[in-house]
Image: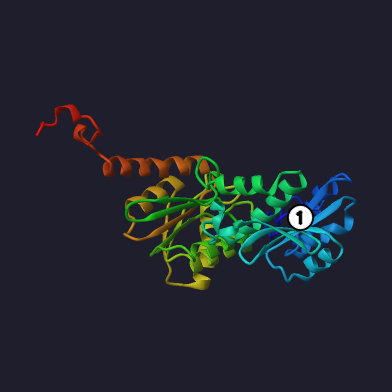
Amino acid sequence: MTNVAPDHLGLRGINTVEQMARLKGVVPETVLPDGYAILNADDELVYNMRRDLKCKIALFSMDEDNERIKKHASNNGLYALYENGFITVCKGNWKMRVIKAVNVPLTFGGKARFMIQNVLPAVLTGYVRGFDLRDIASALTTFIPSPSQTPGRLNLFEFKNFKVLLDYAHNAAGMEALFRFIENLEGSPKVGIIAGIGDRREEDNVAMGKLAAEMFDIVYIRQDKHLRGKTEEELIAMLMKGIHSHDPNKEVKIFKNETEAITHAIEKALPGSLITMCSDVIPDALSLVMEYKEKEANKLYEFTKSDIPNMNIGKLPIT
């Protein structure tokens, strides 16, 4: 259990994060007594889920000085930590360093700290299932963030003069994590493509707009394929309210759909820019971006028969 965030509130009678935590807590309650529930000790609502569990408990934390971790360690508990740059599995006060976080491709050299956090419970899961730590380390180094292995999760495309980042971030918590990541990426201006979500509360969409204004120099608003109960005008108004609450003069462009927004962003990209696309229909967005990437590659790597290695060896003059 990684976190409980104020997302999907206002749906099906769930109106507070505490109610959401109770709902999510049903999942670890199903774990059998000899199994493990792996809980985030940095999230109070997740940590408190342990009270209703009949199974074994393992914790993970990005902070080795976390008091909850120290208490767990004093009881000889099993946990994972990010400490001194390492992903580490611990039992009581016994530490087993698995790998440096910067060497895990999913973390983008340690720049994506939320991915470091995600790796911790994954490592714990492998460990309690009996995998050798060396095999876990090998798996982490060979799992590469890419359209094929992690579609829609931090897919970074390097074009000749600009970069494109595609991610599924679609709520305030996801946007905040993305914000901390792109702060560490080179690229200016930073352009963001966002959309309002029809089945979220007004305050959720306003928060998305405010975050976008903080994250990006230029904001593109596009419409989701499915509006989920609200009109285009309502969603745009909510996002604009958030954007203007941070910067009344923020440059904003509005597009009818994601295809138009992506096409405009790539074809009008300024040299050195970083374009971040928050997409809800990942296959369509990936297909379009990769189509542009292939077109650029075809232009950059055109060659003639004279470029083929060894083709003319038999025709070279003898001296």
Residue closer to the observer: 291 or 23: 291
Which residue sits at x=59%, y=58%?
Answer: 101
Check the image and report above or below for 52 versus 319: below
Residue 257 visible from this viewpoint = no
Residue closer to the observer: 56 or 51: 56
Which residue sits at x=61%, y=59%?
Answer: 114
Find residue 35 and report its horizontal and vertical position in percent. 84, 46
Residue closer to the observer: 6 or 115: 115
Find residue 70 and report its horizontal and vertical position in percent. 80, 68
Which structural element holds mark 1? loop
> Can you say which quadrant of the picture contains the C terminus?
top left
In-image side of 120 versus 144 (left or right)? right
**Residue pointed to by mark 1:** 14
Which residue sits at x=32%, y=55%?
Answer: 161
Which residue sits at x=34%, y=61%?
Answer: 272
Residue 176 visible from this viewpoint = yes
In-image side of 11 versus 170 (left or right)? right
Rendering colour mode: rainbow
Quarter of the figure with residue 187: bottom left
Disc 1 crowd, CA 10 A, few/some/many (<14, 14-19, 20+) = some
Q: Which amino acid, by three-letter code, is at mark 1? A: Ile
Find residue 17 and report its horizontal and vertical position in percent. 75, 61
Check the image and report above or below for 191 versus 141: below
- Pick out the residue farthest to the front: 319
